[in-house]
Image: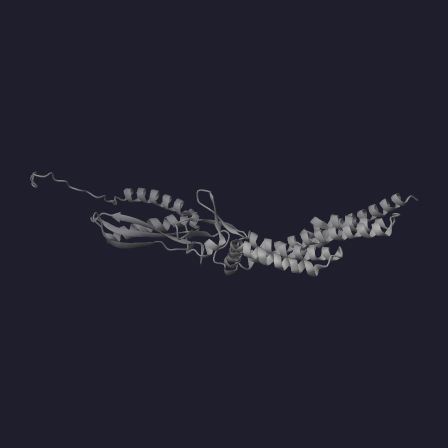
Amino acid sequence: MNFFILSLLVFSCIFLSAYLFKKIFFRYLIFISQKTKWAWDDFLVNSLGKIYYFWVFLLASHISLYFLPIDGKYLQLINKILLILFIISFCLFLSRLLVSLLEFYIHQKMELAPKVTLFEIIVKVVIFFIGLILILNILNINILPFITTLGIAGLAIGLALKDTLENFFAGLHLVIAKQIRPGDFIRLENGLEGVVEDITWRTTILRQLQNNFVIIPNSKLAQNIILNYHQPESNQTLIVPLTISYRHDLKDVENLLLDFLNKFVREHPLANNEFTPAIRYTGFGDSGINLNILVQVKEPTDRFKLIHDLIRELYSYLKAHDIEIPYPIRRVYLEGQSLNK
């Protein structure tokens, strides 16, 4: 039988066997992984399914090569290439698996949003660096001079990229300390505010309410005074000022307003109905009694919408109950004109 036909048959048999194995065994693995309480087996099966056929291709190629009349020197070279491809693919598989597990852990245990690019970069750099060392070893390249050169180059790069490394470690500190998290709505000391979209190895990305991106170096953010509206909880107390006329009885006004507010927070989807609305009188104004209305919004980004709806409905309610909202009145007397006129 022709060597090439025999090699092709071996390759095809291995591939067909692997295909049938996946069809039968992988279904069982998926079924078992869905029944367990652990998450790692789900990620393992999912990651393995993406790289499975490539590994089968490498294995089938390696075995079928021995049925071909190839010189030993070239056979060894081809096998080295196949092994290098396997190492690269394994690094890719392992990085995907670890990133998925890390994102799950960050989301479940550290209560962070899944998207944290900084951790993903660290995992990939470490895994592919180890893979590079293994590949150099396969190619019979002495890794000791390489590591020494890498150390010297790392020192030079570290000095040259001082700001970049400062941003990297500042971002790492922000994530580990959980001072800010992707998904948090924050306000900086200069008045800039927005939702944290992502924390990368160099910058933090904020999405403003106007839907614009603001890119902030991590080192600058770490040195800022930050107001985090999502910590310790996302519920935010809103203070809406109001003035009522002196002619009203304050107890009656308070009861009317509380009746309205209790109904409003129960029915409005953005209001936190677990928070009891409150009225607090704050002083005697020029035109009436000043007071503050206190309600809570579930998400800080919805505060403008909630205040808008509250003012609109409250105005109609006060008007229907004949509660006067006073406005300043000024009397102007012209010089030389009698005050009694």
Q: Is residue 318 left or right of residue 306?
A: left
Residue 101 appearing in the image: no
Residue 222 appearing in the image: yes
Colour pattern of the rendering: one colour
Give x and y (percent) for residue 29. 71, 54
Q: Quadrant of the C terminus?
A: top left
Q: Residue at image x 70%, y 59%?
A: 143
Q: Closer to the camera, 91 or 211?
A: 91
Q: Is residue 174 left or right of residue 227?
A: right
Q: Is residue 16 left or right of residue 287?
A: right
Q: Quadrant of residue 321?
A: top left
The number of callouts visible is 0
Q: Residue at image x 39%, y 45%?
A: 304
Q: Quadrant of the N terminus?
A: top right
Of all residues shown, which one is farthest toward the right?
1
Q: Residue at image x 72%, y 57%?
A: 134
Q: Closer to the camera, 316 or 37?
A: 37
Give x and y (percent) for residue 317. 31, 44
Give x and y (percent) for residue 285. 22, 50
Give x and y (percent) for residue 48. 70, 52
